[in-house]
Image (tube, rainbow, N blue to C red):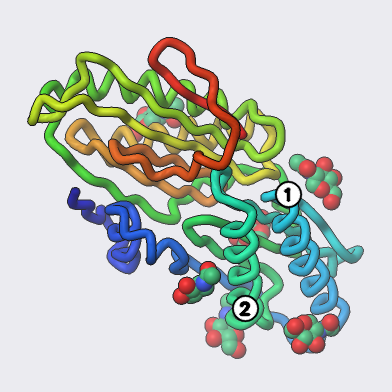
Amino acid sequence: MAFSNHFFFLFALIVLIISGIKGDDTDLIRLECGKNFTNNDNLQANINNTIFDLVTKTSAYGFANTSHGSGSDTVYGIADCRGDVSDQICSACIANASQQIQTTCWNSAEARIWYPYCFLRYNTSNFIGQADMNVVGLWYSSDNMMNPKVFKSTLTELLVVLWFTAANAENRKFGWGQIENHNLKNSNDEAVIIYGMAQCTCDLNNLACSMCLANAFNKTESKCGEADTGCYLILKSCAVRYEINPFLFLDATTPPETTRSITFGDI
Ligand SMILES: *[C@@H]1O[C@H](CO)[C@@H](O)[C@H](O)[C@H]1NC(C)=O
Ligand SMILES: *[C@@H]1O[C@H](CO)[C@@H](O)[C@H](O)[C@H]1NC(C)=O
Ligand SMILES: *[C@@H]1O[C@H](CO)[C@@H](O)[C@H](O)[C@H]1NC(C)=O
Ligand SMILES: *[C@@H]1O[C@H](CO)[C@@H](O)[C@H](O)[C@H]1NC(C)=O
Ligand SMILES: *[C@@H]1O[C@H](CO)[C@@H](O)[C@H](O)[C@H]1NC(C)=O
Ligand SMILES: *[C@@H]1O[C@H](CO)[C@@H](O)[C@H](O)[C@H]1NC(C)=O
């Protein structure tokens, strides 16, 4: 399966990840450092405490929301692991993220970092709860389907479930699913299953998450079009991904509910 990149040439590594070369799943996607500061031990200590807290809590729960300090030196932070990854992958990813962010953004009052399996952010501005819908990256793949219209309608059915499940999830704002339709076949007349996930950062409430995902699904529709059978879009506060190869780690979790031909869960 060949994935090609719409406009983010720097993220060519993701092409390999989606193609199933799992060894590259730990590579950095993007790092942003902003607002340099100098000689402010108080702020530095708040940043240190925020990052420490995020690493500890995320390793234990898979997500975290915290703040440290007061006044203009207050630091707000959140971190998340992708909803399906194991505790081990999550802790390794978040430890790496914290190390990377402290090394590269050592004098920044705000920073954000994205890995395939986790995300970490801190800022002296209180961003908690605000959906940031700017694009981080978009990747897609195309495989021939016997009937692209059936693919499209089956996919839409899955996306609606993912949207609802992620937006209404209790804590992790993660939804995953797979869908089979007996009319859905590839060009070799083989049955196809579509796998998908949607996730918002854990600071968003249901409404903000729902808005972010509406925006994301809209973008996948215009950017990944009819011909693409795989699409991975990361916005700054949410992400959506679907493809016809299984890419989620769901073996370790409780079995999903099965409703009609749709299988879905929110972990
Ligand atoms: C940590 O990040 C570096 C740089 O992106 C990457 O090469 C490495 O594989 C990562 N390790 C883990 C355990 O995530
Ligand atoms: C912050 O400082 C570093 C080095 O001191 C510099 O490379 C970077 O461009 C600065 N970033 C901003 C946002 O000013
Ligand atoms: C913050 O953490 C860095 C790296 O761990 C350390 O070098 C620095 O001394 C700490 N600063 C404060 C004020 O705690
Ligand atoms: C920090 O928050 C401000 C205000 O919401 C925003 O403009 C900026 O992009 C944020 N920076 C990071 C790295 O999150
Ligand atoms: C995040 O933490 C702040 C305080 O640190 C709290 O006011 C807020 O309700 C929390 N939000 C979520 C979504 O957990
Ligand atoms: C989807 O995007 C189109 C333009 O590309 C816009 O007109 C429409 O309002 C958007 N819909 C939603 C729900 O964001």
Give the left or right position of residue 17, taking residue 192 as reference.
Answer: right
**Residue that carries the numbered disc 2 in the rendered image:** 105
- Occupied quadrant, residue 119: bottom right
Whether 187 is drawn above or below 111: the answer is above
Q: Nearer the viewer, residue 231 or 217?
A: 231
Q: Name the residue rendered at 25%, 56% in the picture.
A: 5
Q: Nearer the viewer, residue 123 or 86?
A: 86
User: Counting other residues with Cα less than 10 Å from the Cα at mark 2, is it few (<14), some (14-19), or many (20 or more)?
Assistant: some
Decide which of tag 1 and tag 2 comes sooner along the chain: 1
Q: Name the residue rendered at 32%, 30% in the picture.
A: 194
Q: Name the residue rendered at 65%, 40% in the picture.
A: 172
Give the left or right position of residue 24, taking residue 44 as reference.
Answer: left
Q: Quadrant of the C terminus?
A: top right
**Residue that carries the numbered disc 1 in the rendered image:** 61
Q: Name the residue rendered at 48%, 50% in the picture.
A: 134
Residue 112 visible in the displayed image: no
Whether 87 is drawn above or below 178: the answer is below
Whether 261 is drawn above or below 162: the answer is above
Percent coordinates x, y for residue 126 in the rendering: 75, 54
- Give the secondary structure at mark 2: loop
